[in-house]
Amino acid sequence: MLQEIKFNLPSASDPLQVIGRGLDLLNDPWLNKGTSFTLEERKALGLSGLLPPFEADMEEQVQRVMENYRHHIDPLDKYVFLIGLADRNVTLFYRVLMENLLEMTPIMYTPTVGYACQKFGHIYRKNRGMYLTLRHKGRIAEVLGNWPKDEVDIIVISDGSRILGLGDLGANGMGIPIGKLVLYVVGAGLHPHRTLPILLDVGTDNEELLNDPLYLGMTHRRVHGDEFYEIADEFVQAATDRWPNVLIQWEDFTNDKAFPLLNRYREDVLCFNDDIQGTGAVALSGLLAAMRIRGEHLSDQRIVFCGAGSAAVGIADMICAGIADEHSMTTQEARELVWMCDSRGLVTTRRKSGLEEHKLPYARDEKSANDLLEVVKRVRPTVLIGASGHAHTFTEDVVKTMHKHCEQPIIFALSNPTTKAECTAENAYGWTRGKAIFASGSPFSAVRFNGKVLVPGQGNNMFIFPGIGLGAVCCGARKITDEMFFTAAKTLAHMVTEEELNAGTIYPDLGKIRQISLAIAAAVCRLAWDEGLARYAEPEDIRHYVREQMYRPDYRPYIAV
Ligand code: NAD
């Protein structure tokens, strides 16, 4: 039985009824407008005399924020400054971020958020989101009951065990769910007051943190196995009981938890893992755009991976689903086009021990190979994808050997941060005489080669997950399917212009993120309605409906009650 679409949210011009008055109102970041309260509002809401007399408009407020922001040189200072703004005035925070998206996403998210996580206990100022610990076991529902909002559309939850490329940061990992939800708001217009960052603090094995007197998390070692899954199950049950339509995004869990968590809940709970599925979709999109440049099909490719973790397996799964879908192959047949290497060489069935479950589908029945060069010589790949977390694994020998057999090699060096990339853009173009189609996880500048400017693409997950989230929330999806990610990848690949393709770029301009997210969300909704996976009744015009749901950071006029 379909539900009525329930959240036609008020538009910016609808008045907001406010219960708070005076200082309470100024101290509420969700309602505060600071110097932008009008004179009538000041009179009606007990604010007269509490603010400087000038009635500023939002543009003037943005100007003041930016002047102060630019005084900070250190990215971490900029991060702390912006979080401070969010603590005072949420609307202004998002307006500033949206107007300076390309400058500020590297501050609110990777790479600066990584430093913020490392220092979390030292720079902590104010509560944000929720912490669930083993102490709460048996009463998670009661604890989630303390969250003051009855409407939550999306939760991003991490156990802090594998924060970006920084490893186990325990409760300090909270910066990641916070940052990711900021990207959902900025990139796709999820409503900030309906988002909830959660840190599942099941301990840490990070000695430095355990010995840091300012560490704010639980100071016991990580729990695993049943103890871990019992608390995870309790969280999922309590969250979906309180917010039945909530989308849960699993974030930055180590592989031993990331795959099992996804597989445990994906059929019955609206959830996904961005490190696996989002990365898969963004890489598939890059490949589809590269196919537009080369005029070929995915099924014509031989694909070698360097790395066989969450990212690599997520990408391989998505590519194989894509190939299977487009060329009426089975997934197993599609997997024949993939060779995967990990730190021990080619992943084969002949390994005597220690083949983790997530690698099994890609273990090849052929003789082993100890290094990437040997694999490249044997396989003659047309696509080389790096997700190993190890720098310089795409050596000159590897790239030149690949280029010998492939005129336009596709090379993705996805490891982050920049210092971990498998090779640089300059290397990839230089070693292939400007022929490579190159993309990376962290941004690289354009490279001039033989008079042509080559612009490397950045396979940023932000192209995908905000649109997936928006789409799922807007149609009230019952679950997130791989087809949704596949659709998102195709939608994104089609948004790359001919001009961008001519410059060798396989991703669109990130500055268009709201249009991209809208297109992806509409495509996800279409699919959900077609497949009977949506809880809400279908509107007449999906795109218009989705656009109307997107949050825009504007002040609304207030009336006192
Ligand atoms: P992970 O720890 O799950 O996997 C790493 C894999 O690399 C493991 O299989 C390991 O055995 C293998 N490996 C280690 N050293 C190797 C070597 N020298 N040669 C070959 N394989 C080696 O990590 P992950 O989550 O899969 O992330 C891997 C990298 O991908 C990280 O640097 C991460 O930042 C990056 N990443 C990029 C994107 C993106 O660009 N959108 C998204 C997600 C992850």
Image (cartoon, grey):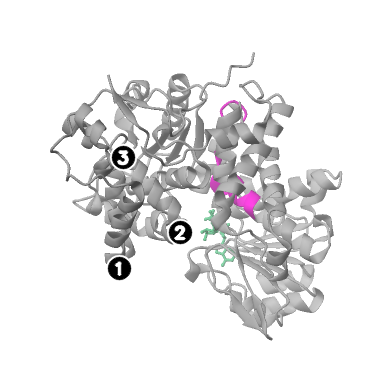
Q: In which quarter of the image is ligand 1?
A: bottom right
Asked if the residue at tag 3 contacts the one at tag 1, i.e. Cβ–Cβ closer than 8 Å, the answer is no
The residue positioned farthest toward the right in the image shown? 328
**Helix, strand or loop under label 2:** loop
> Of callouts 1 and 3, which one flags the residue occurring earlier in the amino acid sequence?
1
The residue positioned farthest toward the top in the image shown? 1
Q: In this view, does 167 lie above or below 382?
A: above
Residue 267 is covered by the magenta coloring: yes
**Residue type pointed to by label 1:** Ile
Give the percent coordinates (x, y) of residue 153: 48, 30
Mark-to-mark CA distance, 2 and 1:
24 Å
> Of callouts 3 and 2, which one flags the residue occurring earlier in the amino acid sequence?
3
Residue at image mark 3: 128
> Of callouts 2 and 1, which one flags the residue occurring earlier in the amino acid sequence?
1
Point out which mark residue 73 bears: 1
CB of residue at label 2: within 8 Å of ligand 1?
yes
Give the percent coordinates (x, y) of residue 274: 55, 45
**Residue type pointed to by label 2:** Gly
Residue at image mark 2: 165
**Helix, strand or loop under label 1:** loop
**Helix, strand or loop under label 3:** loop
